[in-house]
Amino acid sequence: MSDTLATYLTLANEDTIAYEDRLSYNKKAFAILINQDNDSLNRLSLFKVANRYFNMNNFEEYHKVVQIILEKSKSSRDTVNIAKSYSYLGDYYSNTIQKDSAYSYYKKAEKIYQKLNDKGNLASVYINTAIIQSYENDFFGSELSAIKALNVLRDEGDINKIYDTYNQLGFVSTELKDYEKALEYHTKALNIGLKNNANDPFQKISSLNNIGNVYQRENKDKLAIEKFKEAIKDIESIDNKSYLHAILLDNLAYSKFKIKDFSGLPDLFYQSLKIRDSLNMGVGIIYVKIHLSEYYFEKKDSLTSQKFAKEALDLSKQIKNYRAVLASLKQAGIVSPKESLMYSAEYIKINDSLQNAERKSKDRFARIEYETDEIIQQKDKLAEQNRNILFFFGLVVMIGILLFVIKNQRSKTKELMLKQAQQKANEDIYNLMLYQQNKIEEGRANEKVRIAQELHDGILGRLFGARLNLDSLNKRQDDEAIVSRNNYLVELKNIEQDIREISHDLNREKYALNNNFIGIVNNLIEQQETVSQAKVSFVVDMEIEWEKIENYIKINLYRILQEALLNINKYAQAENVRIEILKQEKTLKLTVTDDGVGFSVSKKSKGIGLQNMLSRAKACEAVFDIKSKIGKGTTITVVFPMETNQK
């Protein structure tokens, strides 16, 4: 009997055998096991049956077998296999849309593995939990779970699990737009892949792809292309028809497209699409078609572009992947202007629903974790009630602390939202200030024009009168006529001087009007000198024609300078500050230098102030750079592109 069971299990796990035959062998193995005694060997064999169903993507049979194992394990009080069953059920629900159920079972398994001090399985549960949380966009929760896994694995030496953890942390950091940290984690994973290349060459290839993805998200597509090409070179010597090869081809093609290097396009996209079609990679097929739509739209082939966008949208709705639906709707709206309003309305509706669902998922995760802890605590309380009455008070204290933490976190969230609203209000006030000042200066300029016109008309009248009198005097040659002519010549000189002075006054007024932005900056510097002992020197290129600079560039330049001065006041302890605004060809360069205490750029975490400056620079497509050393001061440089016709 045991030989027959082992044979069935072996044949059910053989990839070269037809699916229906493998399924038949696995059912025969299950039929033997279900009638055997409920012992540890029986449960172990049932897990093998479940694994084979999972490998065949027959998740419903997999679920049924695991439920049977769970009941058998509970009846035998087999804690180890209870935890394993919970973990398997988590795997089942993670492959469905019921991510909250997967989270619930993983939390149950986690609690048991913690009590058993089974670090290897505990780390696996943390990794799987992190993946579930990232699916629902709970990236901070995912990062926390992955870090827990890393802490558990610190002394375990399981390089494969450490590799998976670094990959997950890299993915989460990328989604949180902390690209520096993402590259750090993916590089650590790559180092593991290089050491483990003989056992699993796909680790190195996958890490190269992940690093390329980070560069692609940063719009550093030339660096991304290098990584994708290196990975493709390796994978083509191993398996040129794998899902990873398809991903790499698509990524390489898209980075080339982004930098308008059309060599090899669209063939690379079609190669990726062919592999993904053969592997039935639904989501992958959608994104290749979106990329093809973008490519043909760039090539002015509207019909082909609309065709691929429509196919991507239909498929995303068919497989009910709503993130892919949003991406497809966005592209369809771009390439089909006549239907853009319809696509936009649908996009907004689905996006709002998705955000609500994500918020509910996060709430469910928190509730599941809380309820799981509460159930276990209640069981422990019932078991130890006669021995330790103080446990009840400890539980109350824990709940109180938890409620306090939740309340405190909500307060911090409200405070953060208030700060964000205040920042928006400040920006609106600044825009209004500029608008009002422009209106005032416009009124002054109009008034000056009116006055100039009146003066001009008056002067013309004087000139006309002088000319008529001189004409009449020209007919006379007596001494009185000569004296009168001389008087009128003096009058003409006075009129000439009046015209020159009026012209100069109007030119000075025009110059002052054109430089009202510099006046605002000077006000900021004057405020700085009242709150700081540092001496401020300000240099501005007089050739800059501020009226031709886009208003949003001036706003963000002003805010970045304001944030830089605020940071100098808080941290720099500087004695001297130098501010330069210079014109360089088609760019506007802001430099803020101080001789303060400085800091280590590589170790300094990016605070809200620095993040705000980076965000504002990015909004203007400006290049932001910060250089600093401890004891050597700090230099912030921002180079703005001027989308104007300055000469």
Image (spheres, rainbow, N blue to C red):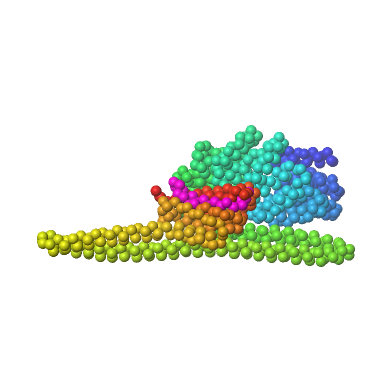
Question: Magenta stretch containing residue 588, yes or no?
Answer: yes
Image location (x, y in percent) of residue 246: 60, 40
Image location (x, y in percent) of residue 63: 74, 51
Residue at left offset 39%, top offset 48%: 647
Q: Nearer the viewer, residue 295 or 512?
A: 512
Residue at left offset 74%, top offset 49%: 151
Horizontal side of residue 386 vs 414, given as left or right: right
Horizontal side of residue 448 vs 109, given as left or right: left
Question: Magenta stretch containing residue 474, yes or no?
Answer: no
Q: Quarter-wise, where is residue 358 in the image? A: bottom right
Q: Residue furthest toward the front?
A: 479
Start-end of magenta stretch: 580-600
Q: Quarter-wise, where is residue 515 in the image? A: bottom left
Image location (x, y in percent) of residue 76: 85, 53
Image location (x, y in percent) of residue 281: 62, 45
Residue at left offset 51%, top offset 53%: 579
Q: Nearer the viewer, residue 259 or 299?
A: 259
- Residue 608 visible here: no
Q: Nearer the viewer, residue 647 or 375?
A: 647
Q: Is residue 484 above or below residue 577?
A: below
Residue at left offset 25%, top offset 63%: 459
Magenta portion: prevailing SS class = strand
- Residue 190 visible here: yes
**Quarter containing the N terminus:** top right
Horizontal side of residue 432 vs 157, given as left or right: left
Q: Residue furthest toward the top?
A: 237
